[in-house]
């Protein structure tokens, strides 16, 4: 996976608090192309407002958003990750990268929901990311490689610094990130 993110189709599922912060930072940095970026939220009113604010396509249909995306950022609440994965499972293809920022959701939960061996990377940004001064811990899932991790780090570097860890340390990071 090459690192020119401006040519990548990116879908942000759950452009609420953290998802919205990441989306705005990625667009403002010029790392992503607004024309190739889309997002989802729960409510149509929020979709219209966010679309007008960020000049990207925003809707409420997760399955439609991920179709044809190169990178899928899962930024929904942890308790709905399984539901969202079930919604999008049929649209996921082997060439896609899934990045999850859902706290305490292991990469294996996402991998086990999918039909094929898909690259999954888990990222845990902390609250100062909202100010561009954060720290994000990143770990790779079973099928992700160094290129997937590097691409994820590049994305999260727009809101601070990144560190790559083994997944066994991620729950400790989650506790420190609140």
Image (tube, grey):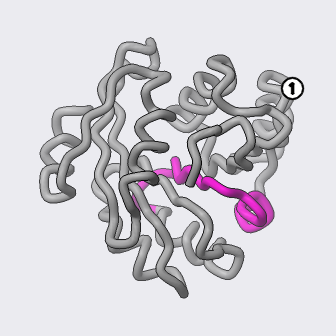
Q: Nearer the viewer, residue 117 or 84?
A: 117
Please tell me whether residue 89 belongs to the stretch shown in magenta: no
Q: Could you say which quadrant of the image residue 16 lies in?
A: top right
Question: Can I make out residue 87 in this image?
Answer: no
Q: Mark 1 sits on what residue? A: 52
**Label 1 environment density (alpha carbons within 10 Å; few <14, some 14–19, many ≥20):** few
Query: Is 76 rendered above or below residue 164?
Result: below
Q: Name the side, left or right, on which 113 lies relative to 37.
A: left
* Relative horizontal placement of residue 7, taking residue 178 as reference (left or right): right
Q: Residue furthest bottom?
A: 115
Count the numbered circles shown: 1
Q: Position of residue 43 (x, y in %)?
A: 75, 47
* Vertical order, 33 against 87 (above or below): above
At 42% from the left and 75% from the top, the residue drawn is 111
Residue 114 location (% of width, % of height): 51, 81
Q: Nearer the viewer, residue 3 or 107?
A: 3
- Residue at image position (46%, 19%) is 130
Q: Is residue 26 visible?
A: yes
In which quadrant is the N terminus drawn?
A: bottom right
What range is drawn magenta here? 61-79
Where is 31 relative to 91, above or below? Answer: above
Q: Where is residue 125 shown, x and y percent of the image?
A: 36, 34
Image point 30% across, 26% down: which residue? 135
State which quarter of the image contains the C terminus: top left
Residue at (49% x, 62% y) in the render: 80
Q: Is residue 54 left or right of residue 107?
A: right
Taking the magenta stretch, the answer to whether it contains residue 62 is yes
Q: Quadrant of residue 105?
A: bottom left
């Amino acid at each position: 996976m090459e690192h020119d993110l401006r040519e990548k189709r990116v879908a942000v599922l759950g452009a609420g608090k953290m998802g919205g912060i990441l989306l705005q930072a990625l667009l403002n940095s010029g790392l992503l192309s607004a024309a190739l970026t889309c997002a989802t939220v729960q409510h149509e009113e929020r979709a219209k407002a966010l679309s007008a604010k960020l000049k990207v396509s925003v809707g409420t249909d997760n399955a439609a958003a991920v179709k044809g995306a190169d990178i899928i950022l899962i930024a929904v609440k942890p308790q709905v990750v399984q539901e969202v994965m079930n919604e999008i499972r049929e649209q996921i293809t082997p060439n896609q990268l899934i990045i999850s920022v859902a706290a305490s959701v292991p990469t294996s939960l996402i991998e086990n929901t999918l039909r094929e061996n898909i690259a999954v990377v888990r990222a845990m940004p902390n609250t100062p990311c909202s100010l561009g001064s954060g720290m994000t811990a990143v770990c790779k899932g079973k099928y992700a490689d160094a290129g997937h991790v590097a691409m994820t780090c590049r994305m999260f570097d727009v809101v601070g610094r990144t560190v790559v860890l083994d997944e066994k340390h991620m729950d400790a990071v989650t506790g420190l990130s609140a």
